[in-house]
Image (cartoon, rainbow, N blue to C red):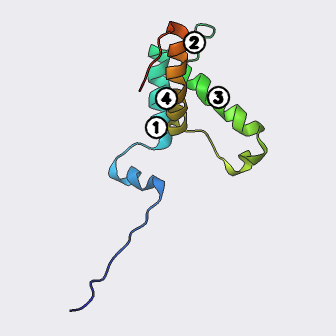
Amino acid sequence: MGRKKKLLITVGAGASIDFGLPSVKDINQVLDEVASRLYPLESNPASNLYKYCLEKIQTYYDNESKSKLRKQTNFEEILYLLNLVAPVTLTQATGVVLTL
């Protein structure tokens, strides 16, 4: 019996755009718009929680010597880090220990 030939297709992260899916820039913009409506900063109503986190994370990486390898912080990293700190923040604020 003959061997079946296999095909491996490798595409870059931007390949999904050709299929009508949003780019990272588009997703960042949508999340920023939603956060502007739902989570404006009390100290600066022109900003929001998403933008604040993005700027703080980017500033941290800009000041790190290894940051030369990084480009820009994107929504995946922001949502990941918010997911990490949310249970801690809620526990501190409410005194209730949350288990996820």
Q: In the depicted view, which residue is nearer to us: 60 or 28?
A: 60
The local secondary structure at tag 2 comes to loop
Residue flagged by tag 1: what amino acid is it? Asp
CA gap between label 1 and label 4 equals 21 Å
Estimate the x, y position of residue 73 in percent, counting from the top left.
Answer: 60, 39
Residue to which mark 1 is pinned: 26
Q: Earlier in the sequence, mark 1 or mark 4?
A: 1
CA gap between label 1 and label 3 equals 17 Å
Label ID, residue 55: 3
- Mark 3 surroundings: few (<14), some (14-19) or many (≥20) residues within 10 A: some
- Mark nearer the viewer, 1 or 3: 3
The quadrant of the image that shows the N terminus is bottom left
The local secondary structure at tag 1 comes to helix
User: Are the residues at dot 3 and dot 2 in contact (C-beta closer than 8 Å)?
Assistant: no
- Mark nearer the viewer, 4 or 2: 4
- Mark nearer the viewer, 1 or 4: 4
Residue flagged by tag 2: what amino acid is it? Leu
Q: Earlier in the sequence, mark 4 or mark 2?
A: 2
Residue to which mark 4 is pinned: 83
The local secondary structure at tag 4 comes to helix
Estimate the x, y position of residue 85 in percent, counting from the top left.
Answer: 55, 25
Q: Residue furthest bottom?
A: 1
The local secondary structure at tag 3 comes to helix
**Residue 89 in view of the camera:** yes
In the rendered image, the vertical position of residue 56 relative to residue 20, given as above or below: above
Residue to which mark 2 is pinned: 41
